[in-house]
Amino acid sequence: MKKEMLGNGFNGVCSAALVALAGTIFPASAQDKYPSRPIEFVVPWGPGGGADQLARKIAPALEKELKVSLPVINVAGATGQTGLNKMLTSPADGYSISIFIADTLALQMDPATKWKIEDIVPAAVMIRQPSAFFVAENSPLKTWKDIEAEAKKRPLKVAITGFGSADDLHVIYFTQKGLKLTSVPFPKPAERYTAILGGHADILYEQLGDVKSFLDGKQMRPILIFSEARFPAFGNVPASFELGHRIAISQFRSIAMKAGTEQGRVKEVSGALAKVAAADDYKAWLKDQYADEKSFIPAAGAVAFMKQELETMRKYAPKK
């Protein structure tokens, strides 16, 4: 009996020693290393648009920085809310991130919107671009004066991302000026672009860089750029401010995580994004996209930036 008890005591001591040794060899920090598995990269829009282009541009570089794969998943619908909800219903563990853009932020002006800006944590703003109205190259509407004249006689359809978006705010602005413009939502970028090429819409609201291939291919052209001054690459196209239309909601695209995610994990992703944004290849891509060279805003300043953008949008929202 004594031998048996002695043996059990010895085994207990050995087990405790092994646990202590395991803790030395595999400390808790190593076990909790982030990231240690693939991170789902949600794009709340269809393939081919600016949000999709950004995700597919930075995903490979992020994979090198974070040492895990980032499969890109397109979940279009509801002006970006369907994809955003996919991220928001995932655990707040940093293993699901999402593209978050100005069009979705604009929905915060609707009190019925179920999610709040406090539900997300932006890891970084990656790109900021000027927007414009475009027409098909063969459109009979050659100038902005043509648009104004025609829109006083009959309704013109404007292809946008969705109701309540930044796109929609620009259309509403001009309807309040007396122009007969009608927003027509196309959540899939390809459908939005082909809408004006196929005659299903008269005007497209989009960012210059998003339709670069169509501009280069002489399939469409900008007719009014929303900015304070003319854009150098399109010096013959008027800026909205010079015509007295002081509206210019620049599009931004950021990377968001779910609120409640451990700060260290947000910092890890933000740091990786900073390295991606600082690379010469990414800077060249921004230039190719007609984007602001200083587009990048780290997590520390992204929240304040978004709140300021939201206030700008409120200025142009229809008064109720």
Image: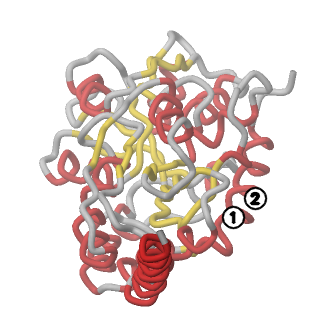
In this view, the residue farthest toward the top is: 154
Q: Residue at x 68, y 57 (%)?
A: 306
Residue at numbered disc 2: 308
Q: Label 1 sits on what residue type?
A: Phe
Marks counted in the figure total 2
Name above or below for residue 237 compared with residue 235. above
Q: Looking at the rendering, which quadrant does residue 46 occupy?
A: top left
Q: Pinpoint residue 147: horizontal percent, then vertical percent.
A: 47, 29
Q: CA distance from mark 2 to mark 1?
A: 5 Å
Q: Crowding at label 2, few (<14), some or many (≥20) Cα neighbours within 10 Å?
A: few
243 horizontally vs 184: left or right: right
Visual colour scheme: secondary structure
* Element class at badge 2: helix
Name above or below for residue 44 compared with residue 196. below
Q: Residue at x 56, y 55 (%)?
A: 250
In this view, the residue farthest toward the left is: 217
Q: Label 2 sits on what residue type?
A: Gln
Name above or below for residue 238 compared with residue 167. below
Q: Looking at the rendering, which quadrant does residue 35 occupy?
A: bottom left
Residue at numbered disc 1: 305
Q: Residue 168: in sight, yes or no?
A: yes
Q: Nearer the viewer, residue 173 or 309?
A: 309
The answer to whether mark 2 and mark 1 are in CB contact below 8 A is yes
Name above or below for residue 41 compared with residue 278. above
Q: Pinpoint residue 129: horizontal percent, then vertical percent.
A: 46, 60
Q: Pinpoint residue 81: horizontal percent, then vertical percent.
A: 53, 31
43 horizontally vs 238: left or right: left
Q: Residue at x 80, y 43 (%)?
A: 315
